[in-house]
Image (cartoon, grey):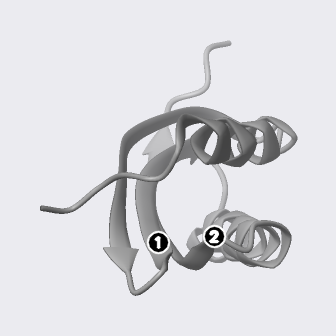
Amino acid sequence: MDKSISEETKREVFEIIKKHKEIEKVIHFNSTPVGYKYQISFTIYVDGNLSTFESHEIANKLEKEIDKKLEEIYLTVIHVNPIEKKK
């Protein structure tokens, strides 16, 4: 039976995410064991007015930051969705 990452590690991931003010919302957080580490995946919502490159650059930087700061994480996969900014 698979097990999830600890609540503490999950909290640390979300603390890193919160530092990125351009991320409006996070959904579908999942973790899967890979040996003694974990692969995590989730969806972020960013301003729909950003270019595809800009929005994916946010995700790429976040993936690298999580993988570097948290030893328990083997791989981070982020899906990016646009969200309409309220005026």
Mark 2 surroundings: few (<14), some (14-19) or many (≥20) residues within 10 A: some
| Secondary structure at numbered mark 2 | loop
Location of the N terminus (image quadrant): bottom left
Residue 72: give its label: 2
Q: Position of residue 23 (x, y in %)?
A: 68, 40
Counting residues from the start of the chain, the first of labels 2 and 1 encountered is 1
Q: Quadrant of residue 34?
A: bottom left
Residue 53 screen position, x and y as percent: 65, 77
Q: Residue at x 47, y 53 (%)?
A: 5
SS under mark 1 = strand
Could you say which is closer to the camera, residue 2 or residue 80? 2
Is 56 placed above or below 35 here? above
Q: Nearer the viewer, residue 1 or 76?
A: 1
Question: In the shown orientation, is residue 23 left or right of residue 2?
Answer: right
> Left or right: where does residue 70 sit relative to residue 7?
right
Extreme residue in the bottom direction? 35
Give the position of the C terminus as an image quadrant. Answer: top right
Give the image quarter of residue 14.
top right
Residue 61 visible (yes or no) = yes
Residue drawn 77% across the image and 41% down it:
22
Question: How many numbered marks are there?
Answer: 2
Rendering coords of residue 31 (x, y %): 37, 59
What is the three-letter code of the residue carrying label 1? Tyr
- In the picture, measured across the screen, residue 85 lies left or right of residue 12, that is left
Asked whether residue 48 appears in the rendered view, the answer is no
Mark sitting on residue 38 = 1
- Residue appearing at x 20%, y 62% in the figure: 2
Contact between labelled residues 1 and 2, with CB atoms less than 8 Å apart: yes
| Residue type indicated by callout 2 | Glu
Of 26 and 57, nearer the camera is: 26
